[in-house]
Amino acid sequence: MSSKAIYEESAKSLIYSSVCYSKLAKNPFRVVKTHDDFSKVTDEWILHNVFKCLTSTDLLCYRILSIGTSCGVLDRFLIEPFVPHEQSEEYYLCIYTQRDSNVILFHHTGGVDVGDVDSKAKRYEIPIQNIMKSDPGLRAGCSAEHILKSSLLSGVRCPKRVRMLADFIVELHAVFDKLYFTYLEINPLVICKWNMSLNEINGCNKNHIISDNGQHMDDINEQLYIHILDVAAKLDQCAEHLFSSSLEWSVNGKMLEFPCAFGKTECKEEAYIAKLDARTGASLKLTILNPNGRIWTMSAGGGASVIFADTICELAERVKAAGGTSQGVRDLANYGEYSGAPSEELTYEYSKTILKLMTSGEPNPDGKVLLIGGGIANFTNVAATFKGIVRTLTEFKEQLQKHKIRIFVRRAGPNYQEGLRVMRELGYTINVPIYVFGPETHMTAIVSMAFGLREIPLPKPSKIASSSDALTLYSCSGSSCREHVPSLNMASQNVKISECTTSDHRETSYKETLFTVETKCLIWGLQVKAVQSMLDFDYASHRTSPSVAALIYPFSDDHQLKFYWGAKELFLPVYKQMLDAMYKHPDAHILVNFASLRVAYDICMEAMQIDYICSNRNKQNGYPTHKHNHVSTHQIDHSDHNNDFLTNETQIKCIAIIAEGIPENLTRRLIQRSKERNILLIGPATVGGLKAGCFKIGNTGGMTDNILASRLYRPGSVAYVSRSGGMSNELNNIISMNSDGVYEGVAIGGDRFPGSTFLDHILRYESNPEIGMIVVLGEVGGVEEYALVEAVKLGKIKKPIIAWCIGSCGELLSAANGTSSGSIQFGHAGACANSLKETATAKNRALAEVGIHVPGSFDELDLLIRRVFDELVRSGQLIPKPDRPARTVPMDYEWAKRYDNFERCTHVPGSVLINIHTHSKSSYKFLKPPSNIPLAKGHATAHVKTGT
């Protein structure tokens, strides 16, 4: 979900019902659609022709713009009374959100000829810090006196109008903030003497009408009134749940509608997937771009889906330019993604919907291609999600053959080996060409193969057939370093490092090392699998103690949970109260917040209000009381703390917010509070981050076999920062195969306003002598990448940077469909360009202009990383980190039981019972030796359980 446009009818209804300002003329309006029976219209002011009426389309057309070649039916109209006024009485007003403030734009001349208001309008910013204050003289951080003292209304000469505008803007901004608007534009805003109150409409009182010659017919017309003529607005759809039980987000008693852009009609298949998406915690998205396109996709993950669309469009245009068989961008038939561990039934319905569309109509003489692609999943069971897709492919066997469809699969993550094996065998079963690849193949290589630009390699037998095989291979031998990286004498050369420049960065002062081998964290929520994943990472990385100190769960009393530290049992405490956890674990400085989107904000605010607990003083003086069990206000009040036991330093130094869908207003308040308390936020909408060999957040890095394969159990020399959490695992894989490995990586989150920015982390990387190069994966939408550009220009960052912004296909698709680039909304909430500056192409160009290494496409990212790394090694500026084997980690019991037929004997610690499902007469095998061979003296005999 993201910022969504609403109808003009909805915007005016919200404003009229919420703004309390006596000078605002709340003129009536009526929406009429082409299929409506106009004879049933009962509005007196329309039927009796008392007033002149104005009819306009209500189809989400912002400002005065060209809609290109977009085609659509004008089927929705807004009828309003015509407001007679002079051109000089028209004004332009716009309010929109930024990361740190709300911005008000005003120009004293409005209307159709307003021109480029972004450059010539007066600008007034209201900081989030002021909005969070509860001063009695302020309305949402603003007052009329503040506006009057500014230059915002300097173009208006009439003092009476200036005062009216100031009062109205304050009230309008308060409603803007309260109702979670993200964009509100009024053009024109008219101040004139004409007025028509609702009480006089029914009586058709003509005494309040100005005649055409402008002569006043009553003294009441000497008053000035504000009229809102045309409105364009967007709301934060993530806030929808906050208004589900109130009428503040309703229009005529019904909840708001978020319509499609002009020229775009939601087909029944898109509506069906949207309905499925609304019923699940997973994510399912589908947009039909060209039903006759040759290339169809089923992409796993928001970031991966954008990258696949980028690569398809870029290569299709290349093939078209070369005279090949391609329609260019029109080859791409759909955009969509599935993520968040959808069930087998959901993936079945999703894939069935796509294949119905793909196999409808007459076969394409050139055949079609289905790309089932994705990055390396963090926690999604690949084999389980593939079950639904396999069911669909089996059902559509004949249609697939008829339409000559080739299928390319590239996926990795938990249990991917089983999923790929099933897919590979399915190709032989249904007699359809299915080419299957795992993490050893670059993610977008299957796109090049589909276009014939890259040879399809012959299948090779893999040493890794299951997760247990991966654990055995990597744990015993370690993941081998790249053979071409020379082994250098570390004593004879030094890494060339620039000076620390974090002190010049105005937004952050995170000078301390974020993660170390001693880092301890608290986990909010009973995320048992994520905690065990963190402990396995710690154990493989040779940590001496677990990184998880305790869990917090307010819905049960204090208790303990059993985990495993290697093969040993480990009990971690679970606390009902957050303050209890912090008091008993003062060395825990990181909070991993797994709370849902509905309470994640409150949990973060509560954590940020708790000061650092001095353990020595607490031992002497006792335990400080804490009155608030749950913080639910925007304001933080420390008056209830016992200051004899607390300091002005927070215990929590970093909070990772996993939840997706937190409203932007709340996120911006979290950002402001974190700055005041000097706390680093990672997220929202993130998987987290990790520091190789030290610490990882939650499910970051995936399962243990992927941790070992990507050599994340020991540090490398490359640090990265990414928007996408799903793509962070792919970056781990790419970097490990093309350098000496990852040193640290953070996914800042896909929301429009992430808690920390690219620059916050890159400045930390710049000041760290252990990091030799930096990789940045940005995306369309937002302007965070431009802060990096400015930092490089100013010389604050001198280390080599490789950067790529995904989402370049947005402009190509918009041009092909005749829409604006902002009409393309990708998988992440922030992945939508609201201006040309926010497009991926503009960002990539700006990054390249300051000397940052920018590949031609994501398909070339791995080669560029390898080239830059090798050059640093050859020049002596970087010395590859030495490799070391990981500590052997037992396979996760749940996965072993589900897929490798292990079953733990709970009555004997450490014992394992093999559950063999077979009807064959061959001898059973236990750890390779046949079960009929006697075991060595001193070893217990394995129990064998047979079954069907």
Image (cartoon, grey):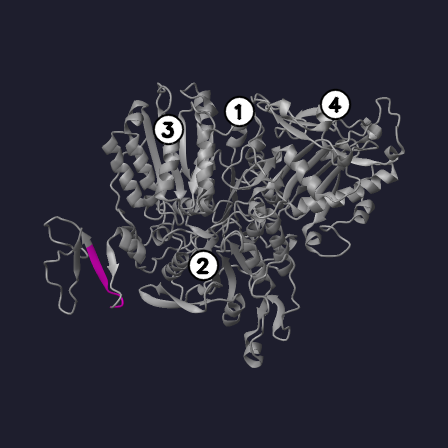
Task: For marks 1 and 3, give the one nearer the viewer.
Answer: 3
| Amino acid type at mark 2 | Phe
Residue 724 vs residue 135: left or right? left
- Residue ID at (40%, 30%): 296
Image height of 588 relative to 1, above or below: below
Q: Which mark is residue 695?
A: 2
- The residue closer to the viewer here, 480 or 838, is 838
Report the Cα–Cα distance between label 1 and label 4: 41 Å
Total numbered badges shown on the rendered structure = 4
Of the residues under marks 2 and 4, which one precedes in the sequence? Answer: 4
Dot 3 alpha-carbon crowd within 10 angstroms: few under 14, some 14 to 19, many 20 or more = some
Q: Secondary structure at mark 3?
A: helix
Q: Which residue is mark 4?
A: 49
The percent position of residue 909, horizontal first and vertical second, equals: 27, 68
Q: Nearer the viewer, mark 1 or mark 4?
A: 4
Instruction: Tell me how far mark 1 sits from mark 2, CA to CA.
Output: 46 Å
Q: Where in the figure is residue 632, as x and y percent of width and height?
A: 60, 58
Residue hosting label 3: 356
Q: Is residue 459 visible?
A: no
Mark 4 residue type: Asn
Judge whether 882 appears above or below 824 on screen: below
- Among numbered discs 1 and 2, the one appearing first in the sequence: 2
Q: Cα distance, mark 1 to mark 3?
A: 23 Å
Provide the residue designation for mark 1. 817
Sort mark 2 into few (<14), some (14-19) or many (20+) by Cα contacts within 10 Å: many
Q: CA distance from mark 2 to mark 3?
A: 45 Å
Q: Residues within 10 Å of mark 1 (few under 14, many from 20)?
A: some
Q: Residue furthest bottom?
A: 620
Secondary structure type for disc 4: loop
Task: Identify the residue at image location x=43%, y=46%.
Answer: 340
